[in-house]
Image (cartoon, rainbow, N blue to C red):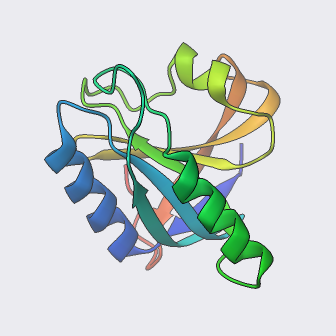
Amino acid sequence: MGMRCRISRSVLIGIRRISADAAPHEACGLLFGEPDAITAFQAAENVAQTPETRFELDPSALFAALRAERAGGPRIVGYWHSHPSGDARPSATDAAMAAPDRKLWVIVAGKEVTCWRAVEGGVVHERFDPIDLRERFGADLR
């Protein structure tokens, strides 16, 4: 596959901690950086009707981040959310929600953190291709 993405340690620590605190609800938020490097994150409220099994980003947080990006602020490179059930693969629900816009989707399940790119005809649910996620200082996360 060859696709790689680096992620800063502070992002990893932050999304793991927020995900653990939110359980049994799914936590979620935005990722910032470049298409191959996640350098910052933001947590957002999960406004889904059933936050135990799905996530829906608070639209106001997304719109604010999009406005900031247009004004020269941090670039939104994707989304993160947790799977409190412990499976770090994208679900069929995730695939149904994801536009094939090449954005990164990071999933946190306990200590495991995986990364996927939302594409047309992906290998998982025909929507996601796996991305090799590496900590910014070179260590492999597997």
Vertical placement of 2 versus 129: above or below?
below
Residue plotted at (25% across, 30% down): 84
Left or right of 7 on screen, residue 19:
left
Q: Position of residue 4 (x, y in %)?
A: 64, 58
Residue 2 in sight here: yes
| Residue at the limit of the structure toward the right, as seen here | 120
Residue plotted at (24% across, 55% down): 18
Q: Position of residue 105 (x, y in %)?
A: 57, 44
**Residue 35 appears in which quarter of the rendering?**
bottom right
From the viewer's side, name the closer residue of 77 and 133. 77
| Residue at the limit of the structure toward the bottom, as seen here | 72
Vertical placement of 102 versus 94: above or below?
below
Vertical placement of 48 versus 69: above or below?
above
From the viewer's side, name the closer residue of 134 and 37. 37
**Quadrant where the image shows the N terminus:** top right
Residue plotted at (28% across, 23% down): 52
Residue plotted at (48% across, 48% down): 80
**Residue 69 appears in which quarter of the rendering?**
bottom right
**Residue 10 appears in which quarter of the rendering?**
bottom left
| Residue at the limit of the structure toward the front, as seen here | 60
From the viewer's side, name the closer residue of 103 and 66. 66
Q: Position of residue 55 (x, y in %)?
A: 44, 32
Q: Position of residue 116 (x, y in %)?
A: 60, 41
Report the label total.
0
From the viewer's side, name the closer residue of 129 and 71. 71
Residue 36 in sight here: no
Left or right of 37 on screen, residue 84:
left
